[in-house]
Amino acid sequence: MALNNTNPLDYTLLIKFIDGQASPAETAEVAAWLDAAPGNRDLYFRVKDILDQRRVSAVTREETDGRWLQIAGQLQSAAAEPVPVRRLHWLKYAAAVLVLVIGGGIATYMLLQSPREEPLLTLVPEKATVQHMVLPDSTRVWIKPGGRLRYRNVKDGLRELWLEGCGYFEVVKNTATPFRIHTPGITVTVLGTSFTVNDDQHNTNVIVNTGMVKATAHEQDMLVRPGQRATVVSNTLRMDSVNAQLFAAWKDGDYKFENTSVAELKELLEANYGYEVTILQPQKFRTTSISGRMLITDAQSLCQSLSGMLEADVRQEGNRIIIQPK
């Protein structure tokens, strides 16, 4: 299968980047390469998956040999196509790594299919307030009201979690054990970064504050960077840009607006608090935006602050917030 790798890259640099050892200049080079062609992003995930398996799998030589013969044939077929010289460095590296680790995928798969799989245990139960906790590796977690976080009582279980609802994570970097969050609609894999995962009746997405994450849904992978949001729409991952801090501010109520439009504000209030927001005479707010810092502690303080910043009438009626010109 052709990778459409139109922009050569030294894959030792890619490995440094995945391990978090790349310099700012090297990081920029890798970022440009990732954007150059879809095949480059596919290759990134293949390299990362191999490195992840190497770090977490205990495998025997016998387990790897049969699998490697199969993979090597596929790589040789790809290498027969015209490719940049530097791509051959990847094939050489892949051979060395895969002989050691690819069989771990078989062992891991067989383990996951075992009927003796450990049950999920509750780490954070459903509650009416934001729940905050620190995991044994110092990763910090916030769970939105109504959400639940679970794990399996196995080795490194607290680096693999199952989320229902919405959570914000500040993951401590650990290249030996990737951090994974599973939801019904999306899976997120990271080594160390901060991000919001949301999977409820309204949205299924991941929004990145720092670092990068791999989002997986419906057999699609997407690399998500700071200020980007990957959302599942009609069984497809779609990307857009957002102010990531605002979509994580539900955890402490500390909002930092930067030319935020009224339309963006509507989406934010619906996503963070579940309000139904109605904007009356929206044409009068077409050029309105707000900047500044606001502390939201409850619906009353929210309406009062927005009224002043928007110079509008903002009121709450049950689960609705109505915004209209004065």
Image: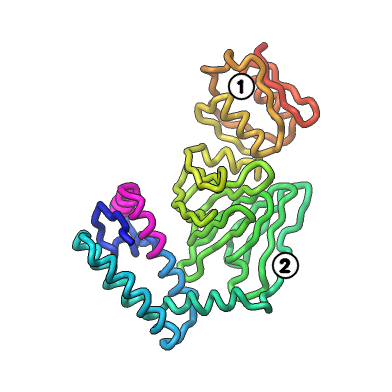
Please indicate whether residue 265 sits to the left or right of residue 23 in the image.
right
The residue closer to the viewer here, 138 or 162, is 162
Magenta: main secondary structure:
helix
Segment tinted magenta in the rendering: 26-47
Residue at figure coordinates x 71%, y 63% from the top left: 123
Nearer to us: label 1 or label 2? 2
Image quadrant holding the N terminus, namely bottom left
Residue identifier under label 1: 309
Q: Residue 36 placed where, x, y %? A: 30, 48
Sequence order check, earlier mark of 1 and 2: 2
> Which dot marks residue 121?
2
Q: Secondary structure at mark 2?
A: strand
Please indicate whether residue 55 sits to the left or right of residue 39 in the image.
right
Report the amino acid beneath label 2.
Answer: Leu
Q: Is residue 48 above or below residue 54?
A: above
Whole-angstrom CA distance, mark 1 to mark 2, is: 45 Å
